[in-house]
Image (cartoon, rainbow, N blue to C red):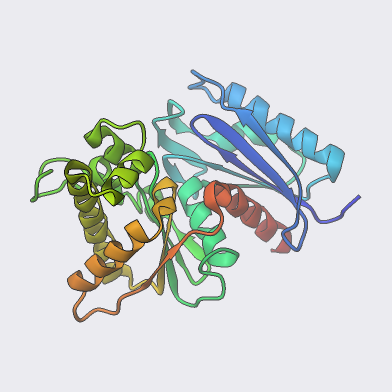
Amino acid sequence: MTSAAVLGIDVGGTGIKAALTAVDGTVLASWREPTPIGDPSGERTRDVVVGLVTAAGAVSPPQAVGVVVPGVVDEDRGVCVHAVNLGWRDLAFPELLRPALDIPLAFGQDVRAGALAEAVSGAAAGMDGTIAFVPVGTGLASALVIDGVPFAGGGWAGEIGQRVLREGPYRGLRVEQVASAGGIARLAGAADAKTVAAAALRGESEAVRIWEAAVDALAEALAGITVVAAPTAIVVGGGLALAGELLFGPLEQGLRERLEVVRVPRVLPALHGDEAATVGAGILARRLVAA
């Protein structure tokens, strides 16, 4: 039996991930369950989460649990304002959970939790100041961690993917539709962004055009974050980060071209991968225990 364990749970649009961790961050056990389909009340999702807490208790009773969900989340009110992939609107999910739990509960948003994970124990661990996290996957969002605390802005902060492009070949589209992994695949009519990246590496003109437009839109978004928040580092995660130098080389160059006077942050690949939100949820739980 290991004492002082905490449980982090990431409720995603298709799957729910959980990790039970010790004080030093060692993963004691992990679980993955499908997210209930068509659950606007959140009740079936609650049952899955409670079941994961019970399963964790059989390994080492957690002292606290952190639960993070996608979408627009107001942590101060404990409300998921809008989560498209879950079909939730103005759902006070913590209030569904608390009657079934006998341990402290931390509630948050998945991207901000991922940012916290990368700032505390990931690619930006040990860095001072503000850390930006930009997961580029099916969609595109961002989050800031300022001196160790995620910035929420009432739940609305970080929606960089929703900005409308005002110039260029994809004028009128949102950044997310051009610069996310999902957007790149759709524009190219490909199965995924990895396929487009491979074609761009081979020099296929259409793939190169789409890839360059995506990097350009992403660089513009990151420049916007930089001039406002002056991050020490921008950590890029999600599926697109797996493209490596094909992404990071031109992305850093594009950022430097846009920031001739402003301090240019380091641009780093994420360390935690698709576990970032789960790790962050565990950190939120750990902070409840330590408070």
How many numbered badges does the structure rendering display? 0
For this orientation, the residue located farthest to the front is 202
Left or right placement of residue 91 versus residue 63 in this view:
left
Residue drawn where x is 72% and y is 34% of the image: 52
Left or right placement of residue 75 versus residue 182 in this view:
right
Residue drawn where x is 56% and y is 27% of the image: 35
Q: Position of residue 212 (x, y in %)?
A: 21, 53
Where the C terminus falls, by quadrant? bottom right
Residue 139: in sight, yes or no? no
Left or right placement of residue 217 versus residue 65 in this view:
left
Q: Quadrant of residue 146?
A: bottom left
* Front residue of 87 and 174: 174
Q: Is residue 140 above or below residue 128?
A: above
Left or right placement of residue 267 versus residue 115 in this view:
left
Residue drawn where x is 76% and y is 61% of the image: 23
Q: Is residue 257 above or below residue 159?
A: below
* Front residue of 192 and 8: 192
Q: Position of residue 84 (x, y in %)?
A: 39, 30
For this orientation, the residue located farthest to the right is 1
Residue 206: in sight, yes or no? yes
Q: Position of residue 189 (x, y in %)?
A: 25, 30
Residue drawn where x is 25% and y is 55% of the image: 215
Q: Position of residue 137 (x, y in %)?
A: 40, 43
* Front residue of 56 and 207: 207
